[in-house]
Amino acid sequence: MYKNPYIILIDECGFISPISDQHQRTLTTTTYGIPLMHLTKSAAVQQSIDKLNDEAKCFYYVLDRIISGKQRKDTGVNYEWYMKVNRIYDEGKPTCLGECADDCSGVETYLVSAHVSSRDDEEPQILKLHRTPL
């Protein structure tokens, strides 16, 4: 299983920014003057990638990057983000027999909405996941 190399920074305005795992160790309470509100929403991102992979016929998805996102203030703990994913051909999947690699490989962008609880023991719920134009 692919491990997401990003954690997510959500600033006081509710905007999401990816932060590489290497930089996580150097973070303090502020980064570039932005207070850190939440750092571990990556479970929701990973769950959205897992959902794409569950539905994939002859390829798998790997997160490239979070493009943008925000916390929906009107709905409490709901988040929306755009993510760029690499779609990688996997000829070893049984459902891929006779398929062409050119039809399966590429890059896609998705809009994801998720309900993320503040409790660590609750799984995020992916509410919406659909492909958008690049």
Image (spheres, rainbow, N blue to C red):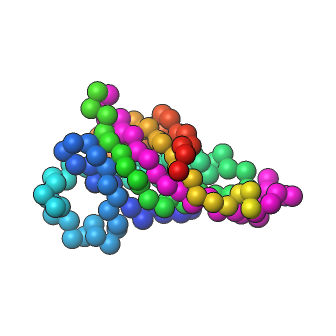
116 versus 2 height, above or below? above
Kindly give the residue lying farthest to the top in the view shown: 74
- Residue 5 position, x and y percent, is 42, 65
Asked if residue 79 lies in the magenta stretch, the reply is: yes
Asked if residue 22 lies in the magenta stretch, the reply is: no
Q: Quadrant of residue 25?
A: bottom left
> Does residue 87 appear to the left or right of 33 in the view shown?
right
Q: How many marks?
A: 0
84 versus 2 height, above or below? above
Rendered residue at 57%/53% (across/down): 108
Find the magenta span and give its range.
75-101
> Does residue 15 appear to the left or right of 66 in the view shown?
left
Residue 78 visible = yes
Rendered residue at 44%/47% (across/down): 82
The quadrant the N terminus occupies is: bottom right
Viewer-nearest residue: 13 or 22:
13
- Residue 31 position, x and y percent, is 17, 61
- Residue 85 position, x and y percent, is 53, 56
Residue 40 visible = no
Q: Quadrant of residue 62?
A: bottom right
Rendered residue at 50%/35% (across/down): 128
Viewer-nearest residue: 37 or 119:
37
- Residue 45 position, x and y percent, is 44, 50
Rendered residue at 39%/61% (across/down): 6
16 versus 115 height, above or below? below
Kindly give the residue lying farthest to the right in the view shown: 98
Q: Quadrant of residue 104?
A: bottom right
> Does residue 108 appear to the left or right of 23 in the view shown?
right
